[in-house]
Image (cartoon, rainbow, N blue to C red):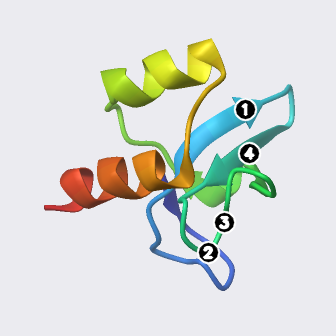
């Protein structure tokens, strides 16, 4: 996901959680897993790419900020 609005405009994030109205984003750098960014769907650009390693770790419930940084770095190359 890319942020379309706000101070974090243009930054790449990974969706950590979601509900009916909001999604919760983290990048492991400015937005850690402990305090994800809450955004409305209309304020993000959706990218149809799933990192299977991150998905698996999220399902298990064991993921580190370093994992997010590594996945985002690989995506942006």
Residue behind mark 1: 17
Disc 4 is placed on an element classified as strand
Q: Position of residue 7 (x, y in %)?
A: 66, 85
User: Residue sitting at 55 percent across and 77 percent down?
Assistant: 9
- Residues at marks 3 and 4 touching, judged by CB atoms closer than 8 Å: no
Lower position in the chain sequence, tag 3 or tag 4: 4
Q: Quadrant of the C terminus?
A: bottom left
How far apart are the two marked residues, 1 and 4, measured between alpha carbons? 5 Å
Residue behind mark 4: 24
Above or below, comparing residue 39 to residue 30 in the picture: above
* Image quadrant where residue 73 sits: bottom left
- Residues at marks 3 and 2 touching, judged by CB atoms closer than 8 Å: yes
How far apart are the two marked residues, 2 and 1, measured between alpha carbons? 17 Å
Q: Position of residue 45 (x, y in %)?
A: 49, 52
Q: Position of residue 24 (x, y in %)?
A: 74, 45
Question: Looking at this view, is 71 or 48 the one in front?
Answer: 71
Lower position in the chain sequence, tag 3 or tag 1: 1
Q: Residues within 10 Å of mark 2 (few under 14, many from 20)?
A: few
Q: Residues within 10 Å of mark 1 (few under 14, many from 20)?
A: few
Residue behind mark 2: 30
């Amino acid at each position: 996901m890319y942020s379309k609005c706000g101070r974090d405009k243009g930054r790449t994030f990974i969706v950590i959680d979601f509900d009916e109205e909001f999604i919760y984003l983290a990048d492991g750098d400015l937005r850690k897993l402990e305090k994800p960014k809450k955004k409305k769907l209309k304020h993000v650009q959706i990218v149809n790419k799933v990192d299977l390693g991150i998905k698996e770790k999220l399902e298990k419930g064991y993921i580190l900020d370093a994992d997010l940084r590594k996945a985002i770095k690989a995506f942006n190359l």
